[in-house]
Amino acid sequence: MMGKGVVAERYQVMSKFWKEALGLAAYYHKKNKFDLPKLETIESEMMKAFQEYAVKLNEEQLGYTINELVKWASRTSSKNQSKDEIVGFNLHRQIILNKAMIAVVEKLGEYAVPYIQN
């Protein structure tokens, strides 16, 4: 288990980790490579881990992490897509981001509201 000291020192690196980890869930959503019940179990465990991580962050670190995840979820993926298929966001990443934000709100309650309003 990671202590607050480790998180405080490495929160920027950890935000990259969370983008990668949550990206796997988005990838499998998009590609349907897992059975849905297995994917839901994996996502549920990831959200629990993200909750525990978020609790260890101070205001600045949580704001940075959420901002990075929002940027990540907002990027379009135009690889192998025609102009007609490209939308202004990545739907699968948005779904995963929303699940992560719900997990944070469930854990932090009203303390998470300022980060989600922006």
Image (cartoon, rainbow, N blue to C red):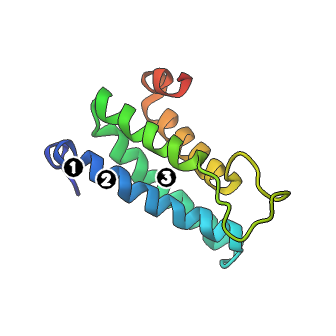
Q: Which residue is mark 1?
A: 10
Q: What is the x, y in percent for residue 84?
A: 85, 57
- The residue labelled by disc 2 is 14
CA separation, marks 3 and 1?
A: 19 Å
Q: Residue furthest right?
A: 84
For the residues labelled 2 and 3, the Cα–Cα distance comes to 15 Å
**SS at badge 3:** helix
Left or right of residue 57, residue 21 in this image = right
**Looking at the image, which is closer to me, 77 or 5?**
77
At x 70%, y 67%, the residue is: 30
- Residue 96, image x, y percentages: 60, 52
Q: Quadrant of residue 18?
A: bottom left
Few, some or many residues within 10 Å of mark 2 (<14, 14–19, 20+): some
- Say which amino acid is labelled 1: Arg
Residue type at mark 2: give it.
Met
Q: Residue 52, how many percent across, how many down?
A: 36, 47
Which marked residue is nearer to the observer: mark 3 or mark 1? 1
Which comes before the other along the chain, label 2 or label 3?
2
Mark 2 residue element: helix
Q: Secondary structure at mark 1?
A: helix
* Type of amino acid at the residue the image marks with label 3: Met
